[in-house]
Every structure is written in structure tokens, then in C-alpha cells.
Image (cartoon, helix red, strand yellow):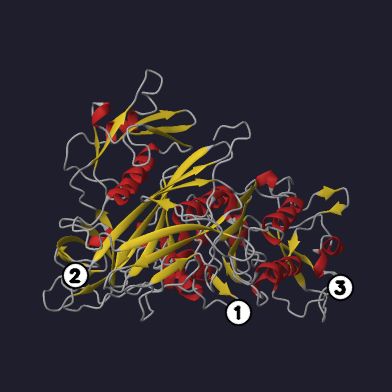
Amino acid sequence: MSTQVFALIIGIDTYKSGTIWNLHSCVEDAKRMKRWLAEDLKVPKDQICVLLDNYATKQRIEDTFTEHLINNSSIERGDALLIYFAGHGSCLTAPQDWYQHHSRREIVEVLCPYDHDTKSTEGRIAGISSRSFDAMLEDLAASKGDNITVFLDCCFSPIQTTANILDRSITRWTRTIKAVPEDLYRDLWPSARGRPLSSKLGFLQPSGSYTIIAACSAGEKAQEGKEGGRLTVSFLHAVPDLPLHRTSYVQLIDRLLQENGGVQKFLCLGKHKSRVLFNDIPFSPDSSFSAVSLDSESGLMNVDLGAIHGVVEGSEFSLHLHNHRCSPNPIIASLVVIDVRSSHCFARIIPRVSEVPKSSWAKITRWNNHRPFRVYLKTTVTTFIRMWNLWRKLPTKPGSTPFRNGVHVLRVKQEDHADVSLMVGARGMTIIEHHPILSGKHNRVVKIQKNESLIVVDEVARFHLHLHRKNADNPLRNLIEMELYRLDPLTWCKSSPNYLKGGMATISYDEDAIYQVTIHNNSAVDLWPYLAYMDPNHYSISMLYHPDSSSKEAPLPSHGSLDIGSGAMGSEALSFALADHKHLDSAYLKLFLSSVPVSMEVLEQDPMPRWINQPHTPTVVQQTTKTHIWDTWLAPLIFMRHDPGGIS
């Protein structure tokens, strides 16, 4: 399934040719677009390629287009692809036979790379013509699909008036003086050769494979000011307030025209202009949000999170209108939990709003863990400066505002009072776990290659919150058994005894080994099991098994069993990875059990890819008078790599 965004961003202010008037804000526009992609749409930096000024030659643009987009094996068909250009456009007289029906006055529109209208070893560079550009995009669509968006903040053939001449310094158009029509043929993209065009509308007549957002129509000007190009400025001003997950390209242009006040008439062109921006790829549902509904009897908000998720009385949520990633989603109110059930809770809305939305979503802001997660900072003269921000922001008194993940964290002055000790170095962080589950009284050292110390502390605290919490009533005590077996990779039959002895497994590590978990339910209750893999080396939580909540039958029936990773349809075997330099490692399998279906994805933290590929839909808890139960089961895993020298 396509989930990624890739971009090629081009911005040119300074041109190689002395006859081309330089611009002032194209480079900054390109940088702003990159920041928007990276910060607002969370696009990884290695998926954004930026070419500025002298790096944006014609050859470099075409080579980068090929390498970063067409031949990029990381791009899956249907991923969202963005090509952005801010710089000069221009036009030349069309050479003979360029169009199927040629006349003397026909022109060819071109994008102007850095070396436009200069001499190369093969001749004079005549830019990237609309014919070449269309062929490039067709080749890209054939390889990666038609989820392609093009932003062109330039113009090609503005009507020449006295006002235009005076506006030359702020208009993204230039004359092409030295290149001749025949140069256009030499500069053609390979697949554009031998394919005369019938349309003479240039960039304003895209093929069916991509959508263009253009700064203006033919004969009009694309201008820039101190803030940047009008198209780019209007776009970046508008998107923070738009519900992007349901905004089409057409609706976007309508909003940009309002933003611009009609001074410059932006255009949206292409067969797919009614699609949601980027075909909705960046705006997937965010599992950290949970469904909320208004309980008509009590007037309280019913949130699909309960005791099994770690919610307690006093837990707090922010209330939002939707649950989509990267789409502006302001807080409309806050919720405070006053009644906790097994799989859901009731909360009071603060402040009171005149009209509660029919459907809304909640995100936890305070778990209200009564015992704060305690951190001791190990500092030296050389590390104190690196740790100053952490030292200053970690609270020293209970009851303070929790971190981003909503867990109460407390900085303590004595190491023997701490859950973890932490030291920040030049290459990352060192975390010392005090009294961990697996090693008893022996401290456990974890090295994290991250320098965002506040984020790391936040993740460590949330990891420990879910690792240690359990149902104090323990209603399924001695009624659940979990077994772990190695499988033969050919037959998928069990090839080992049960590794889980006394609730713990010690496994001789083999990187090619695959495993199966078997759960036995000896209770009188049909159960919904959710299996999480908790990695203390990266403080990540991944759901290995999450049953389809729309199924009418509980996967783990009373006095029945369930195999996870058995090779059945829709399932894969479990596998575990041990770092190459390690001879000993550990992890946890944590099983959550519920008598009703719930959604447990909210617990995931920096998750790894799922081993169990079973689709599931958001759960809507059916309110009944029957008492729901939940419980947990924790299984520590120890992996030992055999040492040829005899030491394990």
C-alpha cells in the first residue's frame, strides 16, 4: 500500500547567462516548500531532493529526475510524487514539424534551468520544453503511477506591455535571446522524440498522468515579492488552516484565489484535479486518536479507551474534529476522565462548548500515572552544557505538566531513587535501567543514537508505563497459557520444545529462525488477544497480532487455543533480530486480553513493521450491561548468540 511522499524541489534566483534578469525569492520559496514537506507532512529528508541555483542545470535536473524519481526503488507505485519549480519560464518559436499543424507564429513554452540560453559542448541550451516535460512525467507515471503533482511558480509568455517592462524585476519570465528553434529538438527528452504535438497549449495542457498547479494562465504574469512568489506564498499561507485530508486540488485553488485576492489567477489542470491533495497519501488515519461519541443519557463524552489501555480517573484528552495525520487538526476542547470501564471511559468536556460535534476524536494528553517516572541525570563538567535543556525542563515536583506522550516524569537528586539514569554524550544518549525485569538487581545499559533528549525521555517513560502496568484484580490468573515454538522453515511445523518456562524464554539466537506463539484459554470467557513486542533497546512497541475487530467471533474462544505466526492465510511467522555486535539481548512479549474487541494501536511507539498482516478496522464498543474483563500476560525473552570460542 502506498504511504510515502517523494519530492524534487527546484529554485533558481541567479542565472548563468548575463542576459537573464536574476530573481530574488525562488531559492527561499524552494526552501520553504521543503520545510513544509519535512515539518508539516513529516516527509523524511532523504525523500526530498532540492536543486538550487547553479545546481539546477538542465542536465542535473534531468539526471536527478531519473535517479530520485523514475529509478528510485524505494518508491512504490501510487506513492505521492511532487515536482516543484520556482524560477523563470520562457518561450521560443516552434521549429518545423514541432506541432502536427504548424504555422509560423507558434511558440514553445520552456522552463529555464540555471544554464538556460548558454552554450554547452553540444550546442545552446534551450530549456526544458513542455513537450519534454510531458514525456518525462509520462515516463514517471508509467513507472510509479499517476499520483503526481506539479507546482510551477513561473510564467511563459506574458503579453508585452509597458507595465510588463517595468515589472521585469519581479516577473518570473525571461526572454530567450540566443537559443534557436532547432536547439529545442536537440534538448528533447528521449521518449519525446518523433512524437509531434497536436496541442499548442504547452504546460497548460497536461496529459492524464499528473496534476499541475500553475501560477497563471497563458499571457499572464507570475510575480514575486519580498515574501516570495505569489503562488507559493498563497499556498503556504493557506495550508495551515485547510483540512487537507478532504481538500481537492480544485478546492485548494479556490482557497488560493481567495488568499491572493484575485491579483494573480492561479490554475489547476489535469484529469485528477478533483482528487484530494496528493491522493490522500500523507493524510492516513493516526492510531494515536480514538473515537469519541456523546452519551445521550449522561451528557458525557464516551471515549474508546479504557483500563486496558492504561486510562485511569483523571486522565486527560484533547478533543479534535478528525484523526488524520499531517492535516491541520486544532484542539476544540479538553476532556477529563471521571468514569473508567474495561474498554472505554466517560469524560467531562472542558470548557463546555455550545454544540458537540457528532463525531470527534480524542488524543491522550495526560495518562495521570500516580507514580511519576523518575529520572536521574548523570552530569560531568563536559556533559552539563549538553544536558542543560533537559536539566531545566525536567520537573522536580510531582503534579507538573506531563511531556508530549502524557506521562508524568520527575527528576530526582539521588540515583538510588531513580528508575533510570541518563547521560547525554556527543554521539547520543546512555540510559541505565535500574532494577529491570530481566536482570533483577543488575543495571542494564542502553545506548540510543539520538540527541533529542527530551523526546527520548518521553519515549522511555511511556514504554515503562505500558511495560509494567497490569490489572490489579488479575481476573484471568492461572487461566491463560502462552507457548513459544521454533518452526521448521519448510514445513512450518514445530521443531523445538516450548521455550517459555516459568513465564520466561531463553533462546539460542539464529537470524534465520522463525517462531510461533500459541495461546491457550482455560477460562469460561471468549477472549480477544492482542500481542505486543516491546523492544527495550529502542523503546519501541509494536503490535504483532491485532485481530480484526469487525469479526463476530472472538479469536480465542473459551477452552480453546490460538496460533499466532502459524503460516495461515493472512499471517506470517514471527522473527527476531539481534544486533551483529551483540551476544546477548532481550525483549518482551506482552499479551493484552479483553472480553470485547478493542483497538490497541494507540499503544504503538516507533513501531517496526508488523509480522502479522491482518487488517482491522476501528473498534466501536457496543454498550451492554454485561461486565467486561481484561488482563495482561508478560513474557520476557532472552536471546543468546553462540560464540565459536565457547562463550555465549
What is the x, y in percent for residue 404? 31, 48
With 391 as the anchor, is 5 left or right in this view?
right
* Spot occupied by residue 465 in the image (x, y as percentages of width and height): 29, 48
Return the residue at label 2.
Answer: 301
Which mark sits nearer the N-terminus, 1 or 3?
3
User: Going 73% across and 65% down the picture, which residue do you hit?
Assistant: 136
The reply to whether residue 574 is visible in this rendering is yes
Disc 3 to disc 2, C-alpha distance: 65 Å
The quarter of the picture where the N terminus appears is: bottom right
Farthest residue, direction left:
298
Q: Which mark is residue 271?
A: 1
Q: Is residue 376 above or below residue 264?
A: above
Q: Is residue 78 left or right of residue 607?
A: right
Q: What residue lies at 69% left-to-right and 45% top-to-bottom? A: 55
The quadrant where residue 331 appears: bottom left
Q: What residue did someone put label 3 on?
A: 194
User: For numbered disc 1, what is the local secondary structure?
Assistant: loop
Drawn side of residue 377 relative to residue 76, left or right: left
Q: Identity of the amino acid at label 2?
A: Met
Q: What numbered label is drawn on residue 536?
A: none
Mark 2 neighbour density, 10 Å: few (under 14) some (14–19) many (20 or more): many
Position of 228 with respect to 408 (left or right) is: right
Q: Which is more N-terminal, label 1 or label 2?
A: 1
Image location of residue 639, percent across then percent down: 50, 44
Among the two numbered marks 3 and 2 on one chain, the one whose residue lies closer to the N terminus: 3
